[in-house]
Amino acid sequence: MNESRTVAAAATGTLLVAAATLWLLGSRWVRQSPAGHGGGGGDGVQGAAAAAENKAKVQRVKRSVKNGLVGLIGNTPLIKIRSLSDATGCEILGKAEFLNPGGSVKDRVAVKIIQEALQNGTLRVGGLITEGSAGSTGVSLAMVASAYGCKCHVVIPDDAAIEKAQNLEALGATVERVRPVSITHKDHFVNIARRRATDAETLRLRNSQVTQLKGLQENRGGFFADQFENLANFRAHYEGTGPEIWQQTGGNMHAFVAAAGTGGTIAGVSCFLKDQDSGVKCYLIDPPGSSLFNRVTRGVMYTREEAEGKRLKNPFDTITEGIGINRLTENFKLAQLDGAFRGTDKEAVEMSRFLLREDGLFVGSSSAMNCVGAVRVARQLGPGHTIVTILCDSGARHLSKFHNPKYLAEHGLTPFATGLEFLVPQ
């Protein structure tokens, strides 16, 4: 009997040791396991708490879903252009408008023009939007028109880069290429675009009763976007681009500089910045063939002999596209400017290659001209200032001319510079 008790006690002791060993091993596994795994105990509770906290963080994150194509337009980054900043001792910043879905700053204008026209009834869903455009506005209108259920007809001068017409056609727009003439001529591309809208609206009014009687699909009429005179252009930048620049710089900026075509960008941004701080300097950079420099610096556009109405050829004697003009638009009239600089085609070409080589920035002609202006302002103000300009579009729309070595060679514009020595002092 005593032997049996001894054997039982030994077996019980062995089981207790084994259980204790397993308990220790289990505790060690729990301590070494990642949070949320393993058995119970204090560490298990901590893991569950951490998992709950992570879940709560995920739930607190706001959804970030854009409302279609239009929701992507605007709020573009403001980037430091390192090469120009290092060379001037200023902080030179570029608003990267080429990152808009349509590839340019004109996306903002297209949305604003179409939204306001739909709201006030001058444009109806399904209607035809027409515009005369030598720059990027036509491309932006064609893209945004589809987003709003409208059609687009763009008239462009036949000396504009061919890829712009190709982009327009790919976006579903009707493209009409015409010879370049003075704005006073009835067949200037802008005047033709205006007529196309008038014709479409006249047809709508004429056929409206017949359409209703026969139950046919209604003709939705036409609307002329009129980017040069339509102040929705100005408002797009006063309400969008300007506030973004102010917020992104934290209000710590000294100057803004840009070229002008319609004048919407420079007017809207300059007015907003001046409203925030009258000490912010705003400047124009003007390409060859444009009279805006004279307007800003001397108060006159041109002499009687230079009046655009007397010109027989295209007035824009420049390789740049979408900037420079020889008339005063309603948009440009609102600009608040402290001065102006001239830029040359050679400087624009050289600047584009300098930015590509030094910063990897592949920009178009107007963006390059704006950067020429930024350096001019930096040299005038001196080191230590923050200067903002607009990177309007990329070089992808300028391959046949501005970024075409053969074309540049034919016009004596082949780039050779290694630094900024190409900038002519003014």
Image (tube, grey):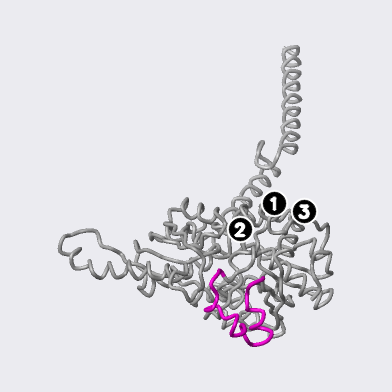
- From this viewpoint, which residue is outermost toward the left? 213
Q: Is residue 313 magenta?
A: yes
| Image quarter (top left, top right, bottom left or bottom right) of the N terminus | top right
Image position, residue 417 (x, y; %):
81, 58
Decide which of 380, 86 is in the foreground and name it.
380
Judged left or right of residue 63, residue 383 is: right
Tell me where the magenta segment starts and ends, as one range: 288-314
Give the amino acid type for the residue marked by disc 3 in the picture.
Arg
Q: Is residue 356 magenta?
A: no
Image position, residue 221 (x, y; %):
32, 66
Which sits earlier in the primary sequence, circle 2 or circle 1?
A: 2
Residue at the disc numbered 1: 405
Mark 2: few/some/many CA within 10 Å (<14, 14-19, 20+)? many
- Residue 357, disc: 3
Q: Identify the residue at horizontal 25%, vertical 70% (top origin).
A: 205
Give the amino acid type for the residue marked by disc 2 in the picture.
Leu
Tell me whether the residue at label 2 lies in contact with that at label 1, contact meaning CB atoms closer than 8 angstroms.
Answer: no
Residue 31's image quarter? Answer: top right
Of tags 2 and 1, the one toward the viewer is 1
Image position, residue 130 (x, y; %):
42, 65
Image position, residue 345 (x, y; %):
70, 65
Helix, strand, or loop for circle 3? helix
Residue at the disc numbered 2: 99
Up the image or down, 23 lies above or below 338; here it is above
